[in-house]
Image (spheres, coloured by chain):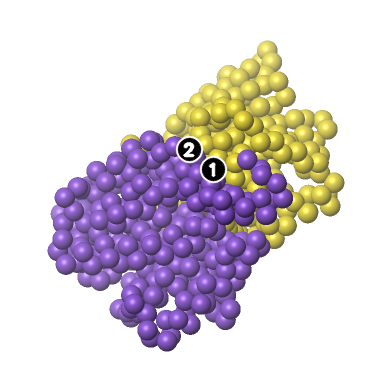
Chain colours: A yellow, B purple
């Protein structure tokens, strides 16, 4: 059995603003995760929708949900439905595309969120699998692309292959189970790594790992 | 680390051999998974319960709420007024369940705060059944928490073996799953056995197999709000069938696999795309054009 849902609060929950757990709450989470890929607030947000998302995003509030997530709003924030006005006031450009092609990651609720801050460009392709749970299948930083297994949490960082061993040692010593590992080459000495974990890391462990790597992001 | 219960048969067997309720087994499983104390887990469930109470109350008090489109709203309040006249055909318990189910989904459609159970589109079914039983059986908070624990145990098994997303499995995966979870919880708080909870679950899900997801204008309004009425009423009927000793010929775990199979064979027009069924009727299309200004298809 594929255990996509582990907690009773995946089932009785989340507490959220309606109308849809997959198209609204899950969309907020996709936006929140995308926002972690840039250090600053984006100047432009591009959302590409596929399949069910492409057909129903307007009615299900998916637009305001993803944008609210990018602005780091919580999924139960009563001001969530006002995020499109907010982003306009902030002068952030928003582009929404309904794509006719099938989902590149083979799920009906797929969105690719691309954020640019003028200097950097980062994108995430993920899907909302139901009941407010999401999976992230692909990350893009400039010309670099990273394929992922999907389930969160995911630890993202850059370092040398030698430093990776130190990170893995630190995780093993603290009983953190790594369920999948992917990487892409950044330059001669450095790779970008993504580790899928069974559980979210405690804060002190994050600090320990930071000694060995850069650009650490906990998705 | 102790694993999740993968199958309903496993859950029922564990309840029998360990002489525990499904609620107790689920509390134990959640504590093991989250590494939290029982008190912490219980207080979090209590918070979810409070959100459910608030949403149901908000939707049925006074004139109720209305969605931005005006397509749904005020009907829970209308049902409440009708119930108070005491002339309903289906009786006070079913009417109370209907009223709370509609109230919750009207709040959801109005972009209010709700607790998804298991999804937002199906968020009225569990509170519908629970608050009807709260009134009928004078349930205390502890019993209501047990209802949610038991229901979530069944829900986790459905979610991991099939789907709880309309886009993947149609409405059978949302309201169908919610109804089956509620049926199992209803049996548990009515003094039925874990085995009877599984029977109620099997009956409830079997009865809603094939239910499509055909939201008008792609909104979570029509028919989602009133579909939760059938979810709640079906759950109470299925619970009564199980409590009367009726046994589903197809075991619960196999019903879940049937739901998955049907979802996979369901055309995409009927899986939360707003392209088929009620959404594709003349009136459904007119509503879409009226709201979005053009045929967005």
- Nearer-N-terminus badge (1/2): 2
Q: Secondary structure at mark 2?
A: helix
Callout 1 touching callout 2 (CB < 8 Å):
yes
* Viewer can see residue B107: no
> What residue lies at 33% left-to-right and 75% top-to-bottom?
B90
- In terms of depth relative to the viewer, which is nearer, B64 or B139? B64
Quadrant in the rendering for residue B64: bottom right
**Is A107 placed above or below A82 here?**
above
The label on residue B197 is none
Residue named by callout 2: B268
The residue positioned 45% from the left and 57% from the top of the image is: B122
In the rendering, at what x and y percent does residue B198 appear?
Answer: 23, 55
Report which residue position mark 1 lands on: B275
Can you give x and y, in whole percent of width and height, for residue A145 in the image?
A: 63, 23
Closest to the observer: B57 or A120? B57
Q: Along the horizontal axis of the image, is A99 left or right of A181?
A: right
């Amino acid at each position: 059995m594929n255990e996509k849902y582990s907690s009773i609060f995946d089932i009785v929950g989340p507490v959220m603003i309606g109308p849809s757990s997959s198209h609204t709450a899950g969309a907020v989470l996709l936006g929140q995760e995308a926002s972690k890929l840039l250090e600053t607030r984006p100047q432009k947000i591009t959302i590409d929708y596929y399949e069910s998302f492409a057909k129903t995003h307007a009615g299900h509030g998916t637009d305001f949900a993803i944008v609210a997530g990018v602005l780091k709003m919580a999924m139960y924030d009563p001001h969530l439905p006002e995020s499109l006005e907010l982003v306009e006031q902030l002068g952030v450009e928003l582009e929404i595309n309904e794509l006719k092609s099938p989902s590149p990651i083979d799920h009906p609720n797929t969105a690719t969120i691309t954020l640019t801050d003028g200097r950097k460009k980062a994108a995430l392709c993920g899907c909302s699998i139901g009941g407010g749970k999401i999976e992230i299948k692909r990350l893009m930083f400039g010309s670099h692309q990273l394929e992922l297994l999907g389930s969160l949490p995911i630890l993202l960082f850059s370092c040398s292959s030698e430093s990776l061993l130190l990170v893995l040692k630190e995780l093993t010593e603290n009983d953190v189970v790594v369920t999948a590992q992917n990487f892409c080459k950044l330059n001669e000495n450095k790779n970008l790594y993504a580790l899928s974990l069974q559980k979210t890391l405690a804060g002190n462990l994050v600090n320990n790992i930071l000694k060995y790597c850069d650009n650490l992001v906990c998705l | 680390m102790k694993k999740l219960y993968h199958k309903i048969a496993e859950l029922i067997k564990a309840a029998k051999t360990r002489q525990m309720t499904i609620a107790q087994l689920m509390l134990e499983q959640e504590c093991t998974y989250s590494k939290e104390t029982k008190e912490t887990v219980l207080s979090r469930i209590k918070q979810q319960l409070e959100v459910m109470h608030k949403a149901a109350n908000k939707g049925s008090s006074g004139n109720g709420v209305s969605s931005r489109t005006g397509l749904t709203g005020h009907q829970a309040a209308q049902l409440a007024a009708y119930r108070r006249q005491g002339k309903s055909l289906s009786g006070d318990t079913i009417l109370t369940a209907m009223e709370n189910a509609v109230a919750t989904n009207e709040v959801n459609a109005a972009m209010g705060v709700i607790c998804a159970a298991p999804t937002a589109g199906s968020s009225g079914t569990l509170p519908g059944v629970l608050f009807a039983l709260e009134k009928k059986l004078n349930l205390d908070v502890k019993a209501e928490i047990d209802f949610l624990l038991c229901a979530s145990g069944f829900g986790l098994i459905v979610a991991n073996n099939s789907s709880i997303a309309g886009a993947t499995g149609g409405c059978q995966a949302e309201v169908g799953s919610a109804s089956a979870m509620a049926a199992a919880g209803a049996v548990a708080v009515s003094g039925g056995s874990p085995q009877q909870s599984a029977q109620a679950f099997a009956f409830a899900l079997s009865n809603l197999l094939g239910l499509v997801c055909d939201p008008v204008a792609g909104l979570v309004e029509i028919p989602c709000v009133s579909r939760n009425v059938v979810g709640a009423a079906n759950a109470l009927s299925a619970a009564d069938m199980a409590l009367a000793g009726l046994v589903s010929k197809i075991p619960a775990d196999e019903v879940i696999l049937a739901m998955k199979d049907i979802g996979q064979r369901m055309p995409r027009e009927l899986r939360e795309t707003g392209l088929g069924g009620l959404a594709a009727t003349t009136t459904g299309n007119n509503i879409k054009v009226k709201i979005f200004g053009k045929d967005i298809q």
